[in-house]
Image (tube, rainbow, N blue to C red):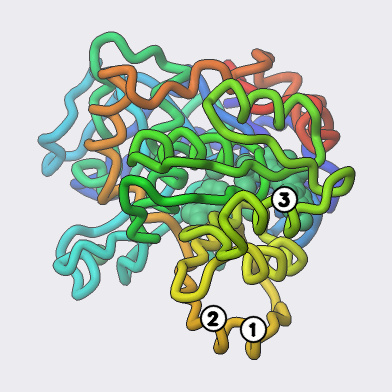
């Protein structure tokens, strides 16, 4: 089958790879109909997250179930499904506490050997382990290209806001307005945020945040700290969502948050990063970080999408055939696209 493979930093290629096969009774085999290109794929593309050449990329998908193992009961052959970006066993110490993102057997699609050696979804077919946990039937009225948001970026935007304990009436800053940050803007508004300050340097992304009800703040043309401080009576915001994965953004988050507030850093880090611990200490900041618990949130996220409370529709800016995935990576890397939908 055809699939997008990592070759070297800055180089991905559509190759012929082996067809996936069912391996366990809880596996499903899914024919991919739509997959997304994500900011997390860019970390691999930039060589920041190391994986082996030839590994199949991609972790956002919607498709049709073609085969199931004997113990799969949540989905059946012929169902149209969306997948969460990682698997969970459902029975380990972490899963029993609902911390599915920390599952002892967790495997992340398209992230190489270190993240569970699970080939990705930018492919014609994908093997889905622990299908009862990982897959959901696409609700009627949710299109395939929007369904794939629930298993990753909308789930992550929801998680960023939920894990920060956002209260109705709070003021929020969202740093980074890629798909994750824009989903966090929507989730914050849906959770009752009174004000959302949306920070980036890409004009189209700032405009989209404004269309979702946020106040856009340009990262370099404006003094972000001054703008947020004067808008919040010099206190700072109750919650900052860091949706970049860069120590400069984390540093700014600690400046923008009010004393006793929370920084929810969902941007990915793979290395050491220095923060101003003195500032964090004096403000008594709570820092939440790590993988989003998308399996824990996916049913609520789908319900909110079905109801139209969350709508990632405007984020889909490009459709491209899987064959053109290398071009899709280059376009997304130049920040000329938000969500690119690839179709085999
Ligand atoms: P993206 O690359 O499309 O967006 C990042 C945005 O941040 C860009 O618009 C960029 O202009 C902006 N930016 C860069 N530096 C900035 C700064 N200092 N201040 C403010 N904005 C800045 O990526 P995305 O798809 O939206 O993903 C965002 C992050 O979330 C990535 O790190 C991704 O890996 C991560 N992510 C995490 C999870 C999780 O489970 N925690 C899940 C999905 C994605
Ligand atoms: Zn992703
Ligand atoms: Zn588990």
Residue 75 image offset from top left, x and y in percent:
18, 29
Mark 3 closeness class: few <14, some 14–19, many ≥20 residues within 10 Å:
some
Position in image of residue 67 (x %, y %): 27, 28
Residue at mark 1: C-beta within 8 A of ligand 1: no
Q: Is mark 3 within 8 Å of ligand 1?
A: no
Alpha carbon of mark 1 to alpha carbon of mark 2: how far? 6 Å
Q: Which residue is under mark 2? A: 283
Q: Is mark 2 within 8 Å of ligand 1?
A: no
| Residue found at the very far front of the displayed protein | 233
Q: Is residue 304 left or right of residue 120?
A: left
Q: Which residue is mark 3?
A: 227
Q: Of the residues under marks 2 and 3, which one precedes in the sequence? A: 3
Q: Is residue 210 above or below residue 229?
A: above
Local crowd size for mark 1, using a 10 Å CA cut-off: few (<14), some (14–19), many (≥20): some
* Nearer mark to the viewer, of 3 and 1: 3
Residue 42 visible in rendering: no
Which label sits in the foreground, 2 or 3? 3
What kind of element bears circle 2?
helix
Residue 290 seen by the camera:
yes
Q: Quadrant of the C terminus?
A: top right
- Labels 2 and 3 touching (C-beta < 8 A): no
Q: Earlier in the sequence, mark 3 or mark 1?
A: 3
Q: Element at badge 1? A: helix
Figure quadrant of the N terminus: top right
Which residue: 36% across, 36% down? 83
Residue furthest top in the image: 141
Q: Which mark is residue 279?
A: 1
**Measuring 33% from the left and 15% from the top, which residue is drawn there?**
142
Label 2, label 3: how far apart the Cα atoms are: 19 Å
Q: Is residue 73 left or right of residue 164?
A: left
Percent x, y of residue 252 = 71, 64
Q: Going 23% across and 46% down the picture, which residue do you hit?
A: 133
């Amino acid at each position: 089958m055809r699939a997008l493979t990592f070759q070297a930093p800055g180089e991905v290629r559509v190759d012929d790879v082996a067809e996936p096969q069912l391996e366990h009774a809880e596996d499903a085999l899914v024919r991919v109909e739509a997959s997304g290109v994500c900011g997390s794929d860019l970390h691999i593309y930039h060589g920041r997250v190391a994986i082996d050449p030839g590994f199949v990329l991609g972790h956002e998908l919607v498709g049709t179930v073609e085969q199931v193992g004997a113990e799969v009961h949540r989905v059946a052959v012929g169902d149209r499904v969306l997948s969460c970006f990682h698997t969970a066993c459902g029975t380990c110490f972490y899963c029993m506490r609902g911390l599915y993102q920390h599952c002892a057997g967790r495997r992340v699609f398209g992230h190489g050997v270190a993240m569970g050696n699970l080939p990705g979804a930018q492919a014609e077919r994908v093997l889905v382990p622990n299908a009862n946990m990982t897959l959901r039937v696409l609700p009627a009225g949710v299109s395939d290209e929007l369904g794939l948001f629930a298993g990753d970026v909308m789930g992550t935007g929801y998680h960023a806001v939920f894990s920060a304990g956002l209260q109705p009436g709070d003021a929020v800053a969202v740093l980074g307005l890629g798909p994750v940050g824009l989903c966090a803007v929507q989730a914050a508004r849906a959770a009752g945020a009174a004000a959302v300050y949306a920070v980036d340097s890409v004009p189209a992304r700032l405009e989209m945040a404004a269309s979702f009800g946020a106040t856009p703040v340009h990262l370099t043309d404006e003094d972000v700290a001054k703008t947020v401080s004067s808008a919040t009576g010099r206190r700072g915001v109750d919650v900052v969502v860091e949706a970049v994965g860069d120590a400069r953004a984390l540093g700014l988050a600690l400046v923008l948050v009010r004393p006793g507030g929370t920084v929810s850093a969902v941007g990915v880090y793979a290395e050491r990063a220095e923060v101003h611990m003195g500032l964090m200490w004096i403000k008594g900041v709570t820092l939440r970080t790590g993988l989003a618990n998308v399996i824990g949130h996916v049913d609520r996220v789908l319900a909110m999408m079905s109801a139209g409370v969350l709508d990632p529709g405007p984020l889909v800016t490009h459709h491209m055939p899987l064959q053109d995935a290398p071009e899709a990576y280059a376009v997304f890397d130049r920040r000329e696209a938000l969500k690119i939908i690839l179709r085999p």
